[in-house]
Image: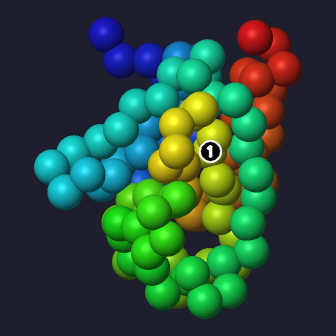
């Protein structure tokens, strides 16, 4: 059964149970339940906008986003592990709002 989507831009999606990061791995998606998210931090991309996927600093892991060079904002997702999933949704404010709503209601 598929959950109704609260947000979906084709790369990043949020439903009632968690965050779905498409093209996170070369072979598929990463699902992060809201309960696993400790915090969200907004990042200014700067030079990191050229990181199309993977990690350049062994602290962040970027899903594949060929439009990242046109974006200015990323969201760093702290799940309690050394590597933080870091995403660039088309509407970072909407995703940040959804994630924060679920963090405060947990």
Q: Quadrant of residue 73?
A: bottom right
Q: Quadrant of the N terminus?
A: top left
Residue displayed at 52% across by 37% down = 81
Q: Quadrant of the C terminus?
A: top right
Residue placed under numbered mark 1 in the picture: 77
- Viewer-nearest residue: 61 or 106: 61
Residue displayed at 52% across by 45% down = 82
Q: Where's residue 79, x and y in %?
A: 58, 33
Q: Is residue 41 left or right of residue 59?
A: right
Q: Where's residue 7, x and y in %?
A: 58, 40
Q: Quadrant of residue 44?
A: bottom right
Q: Is residue 51 left or right of residue 105?
A: left
Q: How many marks?
A: 1
Q: Where's residue 88, x and y in %?
A: 57, 63
Q: Outermost residue, right direction? A: 104
Examine the rendered structure and indicate whether residue 75 appears above or below residue 40: below
Residue displayed at 68% across by 86% down = 46
Examine the rendered structure and indicate whether residue 49 appears above or below residue 37: below
- Viewer-nearest residue: 7 or 37: 37
Residue displayed at 59% across by 32% down = 80
SS type, badge 1: strand
Applied colour scheme: rainbow
Label 1, residues with CA under 10 Å away: few <14, some 14-19, many ≥20? many
Q: Could one spot residue 5 in this view of the protein?
A: no
Q: Outermost residue, left direction? A: 27
Q: Could one spot residue 89 in this view of the protein?
A: yes
Examine the rendered structure and indicate whether residue 6 appears above or below residue 69: above
């Amino acid at each position: 059964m598929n959950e109704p989507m609260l947000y979906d831009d084709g790369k990043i999606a949020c439903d009632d149970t968690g965050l779905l990061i498409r093209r996170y791995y070369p072979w598929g998606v990463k699902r992060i339940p809201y309960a696993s998210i400790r915090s969200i931090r907004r990042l200014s991309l700067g030079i990191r906008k050229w990181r199309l996927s993977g990690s350049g600093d062994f602290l962040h892991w970027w899903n594949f986003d060929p439009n990242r060079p046109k974006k200015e904002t990323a969201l760093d997702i702290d799940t309690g592990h050394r590597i933080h999933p870091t995403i660039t949704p088309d509407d970072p404010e909407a995703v940040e709002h959804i994630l924060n709503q679920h963090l405060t209601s947990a």
